C-alpha cells in the first residue's frame, strides 16, 4: 500500500502537467459586426473565461450572413443573431435556435447627412444598412413604415457590408442615411452626421444580442454549449461592472482609439444588457408580427419554436448566475 501511494504521489505532478498542456478546443463564432452588442463575447475572450472551460474561441465577422454561417456549419455559435434572422431561417427550413440573448431592445439609430431633417425627407433617397435581411435592415424598414414610407418604393435600402462600412458610405455620399449601432453610431455623430431616429423609441422588443446554435449541435454537444454560455455570462458581468477593462477590450476589438466615442457607446448600451439572458418570447412575437408583412409563414408561427431556454433556466436554477453576479 505504501508503494502504491508513493507511486501515485510521484505521478500526480506529471498528470497535472499533462492536463495543463492539453490543447484547447478551437470554437468558432460568427458575429455580424464588431459592435457593443457583441461585447460580452469580446470581454469573455480577453478575460480568459472560455479558457477556463478548455476553449479557444475565435470569432469571424460575417455581416448580414451570420445566420447562414451558423446554418452552413462553418461556426459552432453565432453571437448577435436576432429575433428576425433566426425565425426567418427556421421558417425557411433551416436548423437554428436561440439559446440566450443579452439585450432585448431595438438598439439601432439612423444617422443622416445634415440636410435631412426627418424620416419623411428620405423619400427618394438611399439608406445604408449592413446587409439586406439583417437586423439593421429590419430596423430600417420598421422605422420607415412607422413614418408612412414604403421601403424599396419610397426609399431605397442598400446593403453596404457592415456597420463601419455604413459610416464610410455616409462619408462617401453613397447613401444619405444609415442605420448603425454603437460604437459606429457615435463615430458617425462625431463626424457631423445627424442623429435622425432612435429605433428604441419604437417600443418593439427585439432580440438584438442573441446567441444561436443549431439544434442538432445542441443535442450532441450540450455540455460544451452550456460551458460556452457560462463564459458569456461571465463576460457580460465583467462588461457591466468593470468599465475600464471593458473600454480597453472595446478599443482593442473595434480598433477605435477615441475614448469619448467608446465611453459614450458604453454608457448608452450598458443599462440594456441582461443579467439573466433569456430570449424573450415577446420579442420574438413582436418581430414575427412585423415579419408577417413580408413573410406570410410568420403570421401563425409560435415564438417558442425559435427558442430553447433550457440552458439559461438550468444556470439560473443551480444559482450559477447568482454566483457570478453575487446577491
Image (cartoon, grey):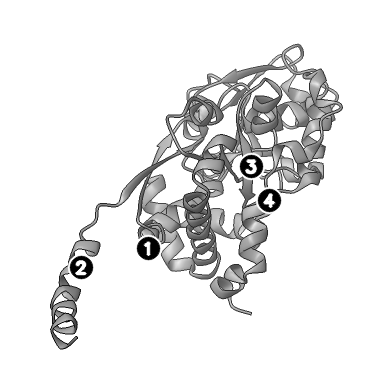
Look at the image and tell me whether residue 271 can be seen.
no
Q: Quadrant of residue 312?
A: bottom right
Instruction: Name the residue that disc number 3 marks.
Output: 98
Question: Mark 4 or 3 closer to N-term?
Answer: 3
Left or right of 287, for residue 15: left
Instruction: Name the residue that disc number 4 marks.
Output: 309
Secondary structure of the residue carrying tag 4 is: loop
Quadrant position of the C terminus in the picture: bottom right
Q: Can you tell which of label 2 and label 3 is closer to the viewer?
A: 2
| Residue drawn 40% across the image and 36% down it | 60
Question: Mark 1 or 4 closer to N-term?
Answer: 1
- The image position of residue 125, as x and y in percent, is 67, 17
Instruction: Name the residue that disc number 2 marks.
Output: 15
| Residue drawn 65% across the image and 51% down it | 103
Q: Can you tell which of label 4 and label 2 is closer to the viewer?
A: 2
Spatial separation of the CA atoms under disc 4 and disc 3: 8 Å
Spatial separation of the CA atoms under disc 2 and disc 3: 38 Å
Q: Is residue 171 above or below residue 39?
A: above
Are the residues flagged by discs 4 and 2 in contact, CB closer than 8 Å? no
Q: For the residue carrying disc 1, how many other residues have a C-alpha within 10 Å: few (<14), some (14-19), or many (20+)?
A: few
Q: Is residue 263 above or below residue 108?
A: below
Instruction: Name the residue that disc number 1 marks.
Output: 52
Secondary structure of the residue carrying tag 2 is: helix
Are the residues flagged by discs 3 and 1 in contact, CB closer than 8 Å? no
Spatial separation of the CA atoms under disc 4 and disc 2: 37 Å
Question: Mark 3 or 1 closer to N-term?
Answer: 1
Q: For the residue carrying disc 4, how many other residues have a C-alpha within 10 Å: few (<14), some (14-19), or many (20+)?
A: some
- The image position of residue 306, as x and y in percent, is 71, 37
Look at the image and tell me whether residue 140 can be seen.
yes
Amino acid at each position: 500500500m505504501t508503494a502504491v501511494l508513493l507511486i501515485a504521489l510521484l505521478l500526480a505532478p506529471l498528470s497535472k502537467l499533462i492536463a495543463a498542456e492539453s490543447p484547447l478546443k478551437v470554437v468558432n463564432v460568427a458575429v455580424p459586426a464588431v459592435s457593443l452588442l457583441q461585447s460580452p463575447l469580446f470581454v469573455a475572450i480577453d478575460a480568459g473565461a472560455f479558457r477556463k472551460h478548455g476553449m479557444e474561441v475565435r470569432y469571424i465577422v460575417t455581416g448580414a450572413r451570420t445566420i447562414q454561417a451558423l446554418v452552413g456549419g462553418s461556426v459552432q455559435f453565432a453571437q448577435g443573431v436576432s429575433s428576425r434572422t433566426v425565425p426567418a431561417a427556421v421558417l425557411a427550413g433551416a436548423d437554428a435556435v436561440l439559446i440566450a440573448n443579452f439585450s432585448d431592445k431595438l438598439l439601432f439609430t439612423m444617422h443622416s447627412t445634415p440636410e435631412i431633417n426627418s424620416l419623411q425627407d428620405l423619400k427618394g433617397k438611399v439608406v445604408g444598412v449592413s446587409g439586406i435581411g439583417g437586423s439593421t435592415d429590419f430596423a430600417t424598414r420598421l422605422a420607415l413604415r412607422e413614418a408612412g414610407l414604403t421601403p424599396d418604393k419610397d426609399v431605397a435600402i442598400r446593403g453596404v457590408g457592415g456597420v463601419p462600412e455604413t459610416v464610410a458610405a455616409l462619408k462617401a455620399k453613397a447613401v444619405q442615411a444609415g442605420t448603425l449601432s454603437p460604437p459606429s453610431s457615435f463615430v458617425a455623430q462625431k463626424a457631423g452626421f445627424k442623429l435622425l431616429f432612435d429605433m428604441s423609441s419604437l417600443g418593439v422588443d427585439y432580440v438584438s444580442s442573441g446567441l444561436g446554435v443549431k439544434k442538432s449541435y445542441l443535442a450532441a454537444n450540450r455540455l460544451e454549449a452550456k460551458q460556452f454560455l457560462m463564459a458569456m455570462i461571465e463576460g457580460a458581468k465583467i462588461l457591466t461592472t468593470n468599465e475600464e477593462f471593458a473600454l480597453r477590450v472595446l478599443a482593442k476589438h473595434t480598433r477605435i482609439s477615441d475614448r469619448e466615442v467608446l465611453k459614450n457607446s458604453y454608457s448608452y448600451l450598458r443599462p440594456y444588457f441582461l443579467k439573466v439572458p433569456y430570449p424573450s418570447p415577446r420579442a420574438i412575437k413582436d418581430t414575427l408580427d412585423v415579419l408577417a408583412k413580408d413573410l406570410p409563414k410568420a403570421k401563425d408561427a409560435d415564438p417558442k419554436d425559435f427558442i430553447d431556454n433550457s440552458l439559461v433556466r438550468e444556470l439560473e436554477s443551480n444559482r450559477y448566475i447568482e454566483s457570478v453576479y453575487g446577491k
